């Protein structure tokens, strides 16, 4: 078991290293991507500042600094997902459509691991730094005291959010095995489906009615992404919800794995 | 200029677009999510009794109308694939054939744009009318036919401005080789500056006035403001003139950049 974990960690290190070398070969593109993606966050920053300003520093019970902390948390979840998972999971429909999935199947490693970790995007690091700066600034401005335990659980909750985002993306991609129409469009449809779901996660939960909040926390729990880590740090949240977030990840992982395994049985290859 | 050859291009493009009806429809289904979130946001904001003076005198009805129409125009006026397609055609050397054929590359893309927007319009009009029907008691209906006429002209200008800005950025591939890294950035920037995130009336006056001298508000904010009668005839004329000036500027810029770009072009991949 330990040997196996060590082997996969080494492989992951090699993947990350090769991606870094590739990025450094195109430094211009890397810098351009870093700058442009950070700019996108400035629009959202401006959006929240305008909303807070227009509503006398009280946007549905959220002050300006609370909104900034929320945005910082959203950027951290989103950019970590973009760095680690995005360029991996969304390649599946194209692999299925072109038949290049065969080459993944014959490699002597777990195919799901290979598909989910092969690419690492360094250009989102500037966004992660922006997210850290924004959360730190707003946290200090809100007058909270530093607590290592609180910070550790915050980081774990963000990683759990990234895991849920990965599982949503991966499950949608697995549909390419079942519906050829989806794979014929490449990753376009699952990609749009993912961001349609993610839209419900990227605004403070107070914009929804209490029934919808319950629905989006327990039945279709997109509010476990972004909202939960944010609430843990600057507002109150029940331990029940935190436990549910981890239980949900485990259940969702198991469900996605069943879909993946059944999908593999349906895979017929193409163009080969 | 012989129109008939471009009509032929449009016919072929129409068949091509109709192949992807399913894609257009699913686009709407997935694009409804941000609209739903925005409607929830404004419903709750107005539900807790925020004074409309704080929101540039926008009543709930006005904000809802802006949100639905703005969302619709955001999807309708911008051809999201244009930038990627033109960029890859330059990069892969596909444009070589346009240098030999007796057709202009720009006019060919305009032909594609017309058919693409027609199919988009036919596919999306029903779902958006359904959304408006669902909110018919809150949606603002303009009863003056003249405003509808000006609204339609403004939409046509919006489509053309959006097309030319995207085309111009795609032509940068002659120098940068790969502009795909700019794609997400430019789409979000246009959406933000055009009023896709929120109505530009919420911005401070200086920012609003500055933006109205750029081409972006004419892609979204301007047509919606006309529909909602946020502008008087004098303002419509004034801003309409600025939009026309931008169309001329963008046409000239596209022609200049194309000419210079072709001189640099080395037909890679051929």
Image: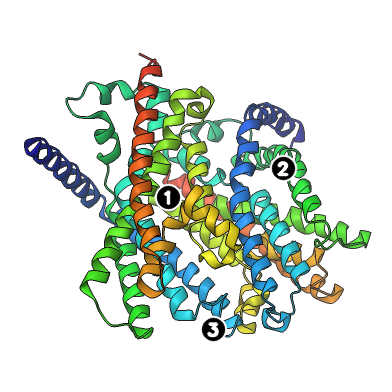
| Badge number at residue B25 | none
Tell me the residue at 80%/67% (across/down).
B228
Percent from the top left, x then y, of residue B30?
Answer: 58, 44
Label 3 element class: loop
Tell me the residue that label 3 is attached to.
A57
Tell me the residue that label 1 is attached to.
B179
Tell me the residue at 72%/42% (across/down).
B124
Task: Give the CA distance from mark 1 to mark 3.
Answer: 39 Å
Percent from the top left, x then y, of residue B215?
Answer: 63, 65
Percent from the top left, x then y, of residue A271?
Answer: 39, 15
Tell me the residue that label 2 is attached to.
B124
- Disc 3: host chain: A
Direction from residue A143 to residue B40 in the image, left or right: right
Direction from residue B78 to residue A226 in the image, left or right: left
- Number of other residues with Cα within 10 Å of mark 3, as a class: few under 14, some 14 to 19, many 20 or more: some
- Disc 2: host chain: B
Label 1 element class: loop
The reply to whether dot 1 and dot 2 touch (C-beta < 8 Å) is no
Asked if both marks, 1 and 2, belong to the same chain, the answer given is: yes
Of tags 1 and 3, the one toward the viewer is: 3
Of tags 3 and 2, the one toward the viewer is: 3
Q: Quadrant of the C terminus of chain B?
A: top left
């Amino acid at each position: 078991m330990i040997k196996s974990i060590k082997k996969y960690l080494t492989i992951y290190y090699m993947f990350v290293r090769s991606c870094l070398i590739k990025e450094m070969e195109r430094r211009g593109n890397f810098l351009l991507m870093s700058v442009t993606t950070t700019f996108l966050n400035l629009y959202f920053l401006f959006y929240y500042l305008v909303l807070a300003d227009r509503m006398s520093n009280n946007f549905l019970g959220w002050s300006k600094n609370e909104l900034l902390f929320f945005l910082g948390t959203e950027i951290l979840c989103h950019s970590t997902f973009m760095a680690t998972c995005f360029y991996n999971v969304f390649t599946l429909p194209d692999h299925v459509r072109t038949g290049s999935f065969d080459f993944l199947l014959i490699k002597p490693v777990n195919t799901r691991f290979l598909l989910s970790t092969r690419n690492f995007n360094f250009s989102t690091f500037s966004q992660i730094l922006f997210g850290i700066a924004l959360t730190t600034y707003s946290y200090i401005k809100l007058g909270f005291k530093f607590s290592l335990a609180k910070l550790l659980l915050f980081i774990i909750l963000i990683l759990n959010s990234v895991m849920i985002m990965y599982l949503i993306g991966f499950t949608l991609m697995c549909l390419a095995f079942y519906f050829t129409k989806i794979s014929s469009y490449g990753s376009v449809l699952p990609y749009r489906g993912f961001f349609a779901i993610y839209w419900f996660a990227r605004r403070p939960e107070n914009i929804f009615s209490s029934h919808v909040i319950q629905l989006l926390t327990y039945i279709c729990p997109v509010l476990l992404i972004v909202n939960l880590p944010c609430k843990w740090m600057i507002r109150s949240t029940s331990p029940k919800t935190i436990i549910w977030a981890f239980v949900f990840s485990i259940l969702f992982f198991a469900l996605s794995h069943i879909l993946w395994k059944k999908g593999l049985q349906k895979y017929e290859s193409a163009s080969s | 200029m012989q129109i008939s050859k471009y009509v032929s291009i449009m016919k072929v493009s129409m068949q091509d677009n109709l192949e992807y009806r399913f894609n257009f429809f699913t686009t709407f289904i997935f694009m409804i999510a941000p609209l739903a979130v925005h409607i929830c946001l404004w419903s709750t904001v107005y539900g807790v009794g925020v004074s409309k003076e704080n929101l540039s005198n926008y009543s709930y009805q006005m904000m809802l109308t802006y949100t639905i129409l703005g969302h619709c125009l955001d999807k309708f006026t911008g051809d999201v694939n244009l930038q990627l397609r033109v960029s890859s055609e330059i990069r892969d050397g596909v444009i070589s054939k346009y240098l030999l054929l007796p057709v202009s590359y720009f006019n060919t893309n305009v032909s594609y744009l017309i058919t693409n927007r027609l199919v988009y319009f036919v596919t999306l009009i029903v779902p958006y009318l359904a959304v408006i029907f669902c909110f018919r008691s809150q949606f603002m209906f303009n009863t003056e036919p003249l405003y509808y006429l000006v609204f339609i002209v403004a939409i046509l200008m919006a489509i053309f401005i959006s097309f030319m800005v995207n085309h111009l950025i795609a032509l940068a591939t002659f120098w940068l080789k790969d502009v795909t890294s700019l794609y997400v950035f430019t789409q979000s920037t246009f959406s933000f500056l055009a009023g896709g995130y929120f109505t530009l009336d919420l911005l401070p006056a200086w920012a609003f006035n500055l933006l109205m001298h750029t081409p972006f508000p004419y892609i979204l904010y301007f047509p919606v403001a006309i529909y909602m009668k946020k502008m008087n005839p004098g303002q419509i004329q004034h801003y309409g003139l600025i939009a026309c000036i931008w169309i001329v500027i963008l046409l000239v810029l596209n022609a200049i950049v194309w000419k210079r770009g072709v001189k640099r072009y080395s037909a890679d991949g051929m």
